[in-house]
Amino acid sequence: MKHGFLKIALCTPKVILGAPDKNLDGIKTCLKEADNKKADLAVFGLGNITGESLGSLKYHPQLLQAASNTLKELVAFSKSLKLAFIVSLPMFFNGSVQTVARFIQNGRLCELPPEKLVFLCDSDYNDSFTFSVVFGDGFNLNLAAPRAYDYFDADLILNLASSPVLIDSFKDRKNKIAVLSKMLSCAYTYVSIGGAAHETVFSGDKIVGEMGEVIAYCKNDTEDIVYAEIDMGAVTAEKREKTTQADYYSQARYNLRMDIGTDAEITRQFNPLPFVPKESEFARIYDIVARGIYTRMQVAKSKKIILGLSGGLDSAMTLIAVEKAFRKYNLNPKDILCVMLPTENSSTRTKNNAAKLVELLGVTGIEIPIQETMNLHFKNIGHKDKTDIVYENAQARERTQILLDLANKNNALMLGTGDLSEIALGWSTYGGDQLAQYNPNSSMAKTLIRALIRHESLVASNKNLAKVLDDILGTPVSPELLANQDTEKTLGPYELHDFFLYHLIGRGGKVEKVFAIAAKTFNKISKKDILAYLKLFITRFFSNQFKRTSSCDGIQLTEIDLSYKVIHSEFNGEVFLKEVERLWKEVGK
């Protein structure tokens, strides 16, 4: 497929025990359909050519010959297909009869012997990746150390199974695959034959996990084929980042050519809000933040918290998290010092919402208007322009100075309120709101903060608090450093920038791929606008690394936390921008 995706077909045609010639028709039917759907790889359950539970007849030369003949017919049939496929059958191997897997494509037959666990799949169209083939419910493989290391290192694990269906067995397999694909930073596919033999009803389960997320599944053999578009680009990027070069080259790999040349369009649906988890996780997020704040207070030997409260989303989020922390640890909410620092650019709406939050949450509010101070400052430095960056940044720095001085005066821990989206875009003032002693929001994207505040408004027992939170949600995002300033009119939608951050930086996607899936996901926004916002994101991300390098500690909530990304301030993002320019020429046609 395009953009580093691998379209895989998990197939469970009807299997007649001991009848390879009859099973051939079902296999061909699945292959034809998968090829028409432009799948890159089709995988069948264990023993799909003959069926499992063969008993003593598994060793009979007549059956082995029939299975071998069917395999030869599949090799010849593959010349009419573009896709590759993997089947399995009993064969005489290494002195005994074993069920073995075989890779077939365009008339080529490749052995996948079980002692060679990892294969390097290379192609002109797709990025290289490694895969391993395992048999049965191999979730707890007890392998010798070198083999286990290879198995765990594969980017894609193909589990061919002939597993029984038991009570809750599907749920158990699905959960294990999600956990394994997360733990191993890989894609994990599971396909079992269906039908029944002797005392066993085979499950026919088909499950695909990708780095902790189950992206496709089918319970039992009610569907012959389940398709999944696996983001192998993201998997390999994650794997390479976690694997040292020495480890990578020390692994035993066996080259296997897979021609992946389909131009199939991506049909997979992408989450437009990738940073927003299930709502059931919201309470846990607040608890994690509360514990982080309390621990840092103990380390700093502070009994009070101080923060700037603007009446906007981010500072409201910080205040709610702090109030929950104080409630959890039986601290006095009056020791939460919320400082409001309005200027002539502060709106009545945000000032009123800040004051209402102070009242409703029972914390201490301190208002210090700074306009006169700013006027004197501008006079002292001889600055008259009220529309430029000097005018904006001076206000942010004055606010930070007051907060830090009040923190010293009250022996309080000064919290920052900047979120992950702003940190990525460099949407902060160096030496201003970029500074703090601790920042609970540093790992929270703007879209996550919106979701958390919306949730809090829905569950709030105090209707007045819910009303204030709803109004904050409806207020345009703005630092209010200029008159009528609207951040998203300047930068573009935060939903898009969070999407770029997640896929370009977090999952290591190439620019072309990120643009393609963004255009598919946000199809109501023109491609030209999406590309323009992507260029802005890339430009701002790399040019503002120096701010992230000198920022304070925060609380990690997800694996996509910029404080853990090693990016040097001198890094030039030109290689990314050149790809944007190339795409711009195509989009403009």
Image (cartoon, grey):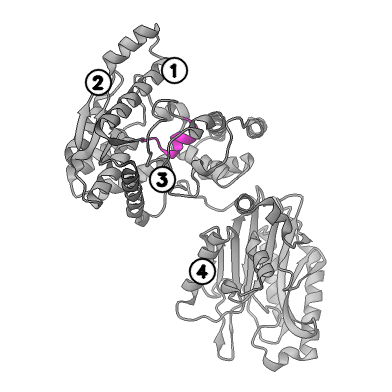
Confirm whether the magenta stretch covers residue 266.
no
Q: Whole-percent x and y of residue 354?
A: 24, 32
Distance between the Cα atoms at labels 3 and 1? 30 Å
Marks 3 and 2 sit apart, C-alpha to C-alpha, by 31 Å
Q: Which residue is mark 4?
A: 176
Please tell me whether mark 1 sits on a helix, a strand or a loop. Answer: helix
Q: Which residue is mark 2?
A: 369
- Kind of element beneath mark 3: loop
Answer few, some or many: residues within 10 Å of disc 4's Cα (few below 14, many 20 plus, some between 14 and 19): some
- Which segment is the magenta one? 416-426
Q: Residue furthest bottom?
A: 56
Say which of 51 and 385 sits in front: 385
**Figure label count:** 4
Which three-letter amino acid code belongs to the residue tagged 3? Answer: Ile
Amino acid residing under circle 2: Pro
- Residue 37 placement (x, y as % from top left): 65, 59
Residue at 20%, 42% (x, y): give it: 333
Q: Which residue does the image show at 48% across and 32% down from the upper left?
A: 550
Q: Which residue is mark 3?
A: 555
Mark 3 or mark 1: name the one nearer the start of the chain.
1
Three-letter code, disc 4:
Lys
Determine which of the numbered discs, if any, sits on residue 320 in the image: none
Q: Which secondary structure, mark 4?
A: helix
Residue type at tag 1: Ile
Q: Quadrant of the C terminus?
A: top right
Q: Earlier in the sequence, mark 2 or mark 4?
A: 4
Question: Which label lies toward us, 3 or 4?
Answer: 3
**Mark 2 or 1, nearer chain start:** 2
